[in-house]
Image: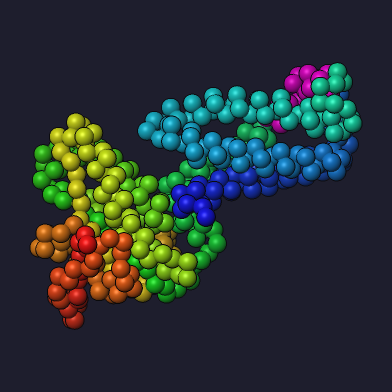
Amino acid sequence: MLRPKTKRNLARILPFGIIWLVIGWLILFIQEAATQHKNLNPDAAITLTPSVFVFASLAVAIVGWAVGAVEVLWLGRLFEKKSFSQKLFYKVLFYSVFLLIVMIIVYPIAASLELGLSPLHSKVLEKLSNFFISIDFASTAVSLAFSLFVSLFYSEINENVGHGVLMNFFTGKYHKPIEEKRIFLFSDMKSSTTIAEKLGHIKYFELLRNYYSDFSDAIIDSSGEVYQYVGDEIVITWEINQQTDISRCIDCFFLMKESLSKRAAWYEKQFGLQPTFKAGLHIGPVTTGEIGTLKKEIIFTGDVLNATARIQSLCNRFGTDLLISKHLADQLGSYKNYSFKSMGSQSLRGKEEPLQLYTLEPI
């Protein structure tokens, strides 16, 4: 069974191949229509035969997936802290070399299919050399550059709005509001006001950026979705369906704690402190849908969000880092080597009936 992080990476890489394939077919159709299926430069251009078409389609899709894998797994992370201009320069340089290598490898194979010869045959290599000094080379380079631009543009949008949110916009899942059951985790940094006053606005912002970044793997590994960043607070959610492992929300809390613990020495060195957080967990129905005219968002509305925020705010009163509602504790039943310790019924602001709360303690 694939890990959540692997599934997420595959879901982000897959559209690259589809984008490249669709654009490749579109450009091919335009070229064939313009030339009326005639090879105007047989010394450099490759005649489109069924075998060449199949190979070209597979090659374009594979190159798209290769670009996606490089972007998602390596290059995107390598330059994530660079300015936009630096990121653009380095990526253009890298992909220019990458696509040149691709053409050097792919063209002889396609030419060998057309001519029925070995890719290393002198006629194939002669055609390759003619290709690099022909208008067809410029046309191919422009086509590849356009495919690269569209796929990287998609990648940037995906990173900014979130993969799940972008897919939901494309599929129209929440174009009409629907009701669904969700778990929410509200996490809040401890003593954030004091920390902000101590560090100053700029340094505090740098702390927040690293603080949220360190939560990324924990959220991905527990199959969570980031709903909102609100100051020093992060809201994470899980949609409940037949495949949902409800205990993942607790996993997320402990993985977040572990991530900060591993980086404690670094935070101490950079900021002179070790950030910690408290969290509240609750489950319930919400209405989910697209909203907004000038800027569209997918939002959740329902009592469960207000209740979760109130639950999280009570952590200081009980001296605990985690509070869980009875509704969620009942569905969890048990959690690994921990037991649920009742904190009694608490009146939450804005709710008429008190809510039974629990925390976890080692068995």
The question of residue 138 being in magenta is answered with yes
Q: Is residue 349 visible?
A: no
**Spot occupied by residue 97 in the image (x, y as percentages of width and height):** 60, 24
| Horizontal arrangement in the rendering, residue 319 relative to residue 50 (left or right) | left
Q: Nearer the viewer, residue 187 or 257?
A: 257
| Horizontal arrangement in the rendering, residue 18 relative to residue 137 (left or right) | left
Quadrant showing the C terminus: bottom left
**Spot occupied by residue 171 in the image (x, y as percentages of width and height):** 55, 62
User: What residue sits 57% from the left and 29% below the top?
Assistant: 95
* Outermost residue to the front: 363
User: What residue sits 36% from the left and 72% below the top?
Assistant: 286
The question of residue 266 being in magenta is answered with no
Q: Magenta part mainly helix, strand or loop?
A: helix
**Spot occupied by residue 155 in the image (x, y as percentages of width and height):** 51, 43
Q: How many marks?
A: 0
Magenta stretch bounds? 124-141
| Horizontal arrangement in the rendering, residue 53 relative to residue 343 (left or right) | right
User: What residue sits 35% from the left and 63% below the top?
Assistant: 247
Q: Nearer the viewer, residue 192 or 322?
A: 322
User: What residue sits 11% from the left and 63% below the top?
Assistant: 318
Please identify the quarter of the rendering in which residue 56 is found: top right
Q: Is residue 97 above or below residue 3?
A: above
| Horizontal arrangement in the rendering, residue 188 relative to residue 49 (left or right) | left
Q: Is residue 92 above or below residue 69?
A: above
Q: Nearer the viewer, residue 126 or 135?
A: 126
**Spot occupied by residue 26 in the image (x, y as percentages of width and height):** 72, 45
Q: Is residue 29 visible?
A: yes
Q: How are the colours assigned in the image?
A: rainbow
